[in-house]
Amino acid sequence: MSARHFLSLMDCTFQELQSLIRRGIELKDLRNRGVVFEPLKNRVLGMLFEKASTRTRLSFEAGMIQLGGQAIFLSPRDTQLGRGEPIGDAAIVMSRMLDGMMIRTFAHSTLTTFAAHSRVPVINGLSDDLHPCQLLADMQTFVEQRGSIAGKTVAWIGDGNNVCNSYIEAAVQFDFQLRVACPEGFEPNPVFVERAAGRLSIVRDPREAVAGAHLVSTDVWTSMGQEQEADQRLALFHPYQVTRALLDQAAPEVLFMHCLPAHRGEEISLDLLDDPRAVAWDQAENRLHVQKALLEFLIDPAYQHA
């Protein structure tokens, strides 16, 4: 039987995604009650980082430890990948020694190539195309605080980047309407837009996107690898800053999310993360819990895949 991978939200059924979120909430409760639960004892996760990370590394490494396993940090600089070893060859060798692999990379093809040669599950910890683990955490946070997101309206403000692409996939899987407000030329990837099946609208005015929304989300204006564009982006995106006044245009029960790190004074106003509608800290913590559910789902052979 071939390994099950998680490179995109579309790699799971809606029922499986729902199960992962429920399980994330259960595992969060176990940890909060101090219950030791170690289904991945003696299992090892490899973690390959081409991009810098705080939340992804902490959540996967701590998650494996809490589940009784271990995680090994790998970077191209410290492995033969940095000296030109083909990613497919590395996948064959690594997957014979590990029980799972998490990769945080630039090109999405790195993930697909690795997965094609791997005998163990591969998880997308972020690529230039998608960030599905972030969306699992976002959906868990919404469910905890507001219940089902089905039929609700979500607004994405800013760059049509990898997180935005994953929001488009989430709109399809979780059945909500997504409005993306971005400057011309910074729309999400047309491949993902085409798959949105009438659940997506792209507008220029952030007030139009936010009007009546139940969830508002944003990200930095300059992602890793785009630093040379920073000055140009600051000018173009200035009208897209999320402020308390902009949130006031949303539904009264709106939640504000940011995948972090945040650049206060740029994509958000200086005080926005202090607003009671902001749940970025809960959202960040939930990376740990829902990814533990994902690790259990993919790596533990005894786990009943719902």
Image: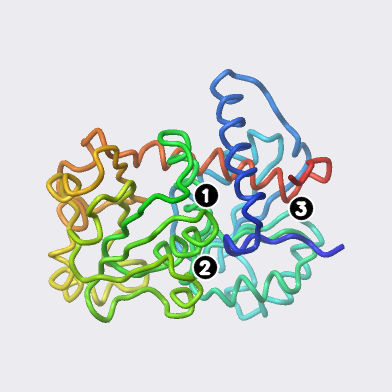
- Residue pushed farthest top? 33
Q: Residues within 10 Å of mark 3 (few under 14, many from 20)?
A: many
Q: Which residue is mark 1?
A: 136
Tag 3 or tag 2, which sits nearer the N-term?
3
**From the viewer's perspective, is the residue at label 2 or at label 1 nearer?**
1
Q: Which residue is mark 3?
A: 99
The quarter in which the N terminus is drawn is bottom right
Q: Position of residue 172 (x, y in %)?
A: 51, 62
Distance of label 2 from label 1 (alpha carbons): 19 Å
Q: Residues within 10 Å of mark 1 (few under 14, many from 20)?
A: many
Q: Mark 2 near mark 3, Cβ–Cβ under 8 Å? A: no
Q: Secondary structure at mark 2?
A: loop
Q: Quadrant of residue 69?
A: top right
Does 142 appear above or below 258?
above
Does 253 appear above or below 129?
above
**Residue located at (45% from left, 38% from top):** 285
Q: Mark 2 near mark 1, Cβ–Cβ under 8 Å? A: no
Q: Quadrant of residue 230?
A: bottom left
Q: Position of residue 105 (x, y in %)?
A: 52, 68
Mark 1: amino acid: Leu
Distance of label 2 from label 3 (alpha carbons): 20 Å
Mark 3: amino acid: Asp
**From the viewer's perspective, is the residue at label 1 or at label 3 nearer?**
1
Q: Which residue is mark 2?
A: 105
**Residue located at (30% from left, 68% from top):** 159
Q: Secondary structure at mark 1?
A: helix
Distance of label 1 from label 3 (alpha carbons): 22 Å
